[in-house]
Amino acid sequence: MMEIAYQPRIDSEIESLVERINPPRVCVDNDSDPECTLIKVDSANKYGILLDMVQVLADLDLVISKCYISSDGEWFMDVFHVTDQLGNKLTDRSLILYIQQAICSSRTGGITKEMQSNLKREVQQRHVSTEHTAFEITGINRPGLLSEISAVLSDIGCHVTAAVAWTHHERAAMVIYLEDGFNGGPIIDPIRKAQVKDHLDTVMEAHHRVGDVSHVVVRVVEAKGAPVGWAHTERRLHELMYGEGDYENCFDCDCFGDRCDALWRGRCERIHVTIEACNGYSMVNVKCRDRPKLLFDTVCALKELQFVVFHAVAGAKGSTAEQEYFIRKKNGCTLETEVQRERLRHCLVAAISRRASRGLKLEIRTENKMGLLSDVTRVVRENGLSITRAEMCTQGEIAVGSFYVTDVNGGETDPSAVEAVERELGGAVKAVGMMPKRMGSTSDSVEQDKAKSSIGRLFWSRLERLSTSIRSL
């Protein structure tokens, strides 16, 4: 017999009245813990508010070392233990005020420009201003894809003001923000937008297999408000990857977390997810290597799958993070079948591994100019490297960002190729955490083979770019 869950009907006007009577209270406590700042939030409950709060902290690049979530009934009380990237407490008064205002405003109208201007530091751009047009792109990943896309955009006079690209399990998802390079401002003319979309479609379809489908979606920007379908960029990337089904072949560790000794010794790279029934909830336990924004990614996945988090606790022990959630579906049901539990496990593993730092990190900081993304990605591609994740935005006259690169087969980067990239870009790019090249570790014949291989890759990359340009005519 099918289980039927009954839920009380909540009138939207009554819900709004409850929120006005009981607005969120945000307390920033620097006295209770000797090492962390405690951010305590309590308010009337609302679906999705947990992700909104975690998003505010993640966008500030704060480290959440522990958190306690309780939101059973009509009220929630959450506590986050946070520090800055250097492990220090939060003492900047403008930052504390911003956190209080941003968490409260996440329930109403969102973060305003005045709130950001009062903050005495940069907030990483997760929402690009409404002066740009956003294009969403998904499809099969291949080496040089971002280079081909940015080259085409440059050729047709589009200036990339920001771009975020993720790759995972042979799929790629990107959100690219453009302005008209000829006239400035957003691309408003429908004919011009259709032209841009046609060119992007051509690039995506150039190497697709039979049956593969790519999607290029234009998000229209209104002059006095948010664009249609406006969403936080990284949340949107999770949604796009989920829509592409990148989770289908994601598997957790065969050992349960408590039985995997390698996990607690920091040597297990797999993700451990267990799900079981517990007192009317589905209890989800996640153990994996700790990393920045881990909490944001898991909570984002649960929200995308229409789960409500009623209770949760998260923390880290050394290099290992552990999270425990007590959840139900939005309709009040729990996970009753192994098929449902298996799907959630796959989706959580995918959400955690999408942001995994695969490859060597290249940081960029240089003067902003038309075609910059095209120039950088072309140099990376021509030196036989492949981009697995990228993020770039403009801050006034300066462009900043990061690229994670591997060789074309997904393996370790050749130090000489990285040095060539740094040299050709004139100091605009530098490698982070690059291992020094070992002298005398390779024979002359192997070095010659590498040189021939690099020349071959260079030839084919140029040929592929030429063929793409011909198809675009």
Image (cartoon, rainbow, N blue to C red):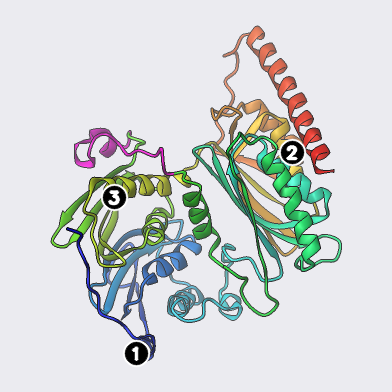
Residue 115 on image: x %, y %: 56, 79
For image coordinates 45% across by 56% down, the residue present is 86
Q: Which residue is mark 1?
A: 14
Q: Which residues are magenta?
A: 247-267
Q: Which residue is mark 2?
A: 378
Q: Which residue is mark 3?
A: 340
52 displayed left or right of 213? left
* Three-letter code, disc 1: Ile
Q: Nearer the viewer, mark 3 or mark 2?
A: 3
The Cα–Cα distance between marks 3 and 2, rounded to whole angstroms, is 43 Å
* Three-letter code, disc 2: Arg
The image quarter in which residue 416 lies? top right
Helix, strand or loop at disc 1?
helix
| Disc with the residue nearer the chain's start (3 vs 2) | 3
Neighbourhood count class around disc 3 (C-alpha, 10 Å): few under 14, some 14–19, many 20 upward: few
Image quarter where the N terminus lies is bottom left
Helix, strand or loop at disc 2?
helix
The Cα–Cα distance between marks 1 and 3, rounded to whole angstroms, is 34 Å
Image quarter where the C terminus lies is top right
Residue 154 sits above or below residue 38 on the image: above
For image coordinates 74% across by 30% down, the residue present is 461
Neighbourhood count class around disc 1 (C-alpha, 10 Å): few under 14, some 14–19, many 20 upward: few
| Disc with the residue nearer the chain's start (1 vs 3) | 1
- Please check the rendered image and state whether residue 19 is part of the magenta-colored stretch, yes or no: no
Residue 320 on image: x %, y %: 31, 45
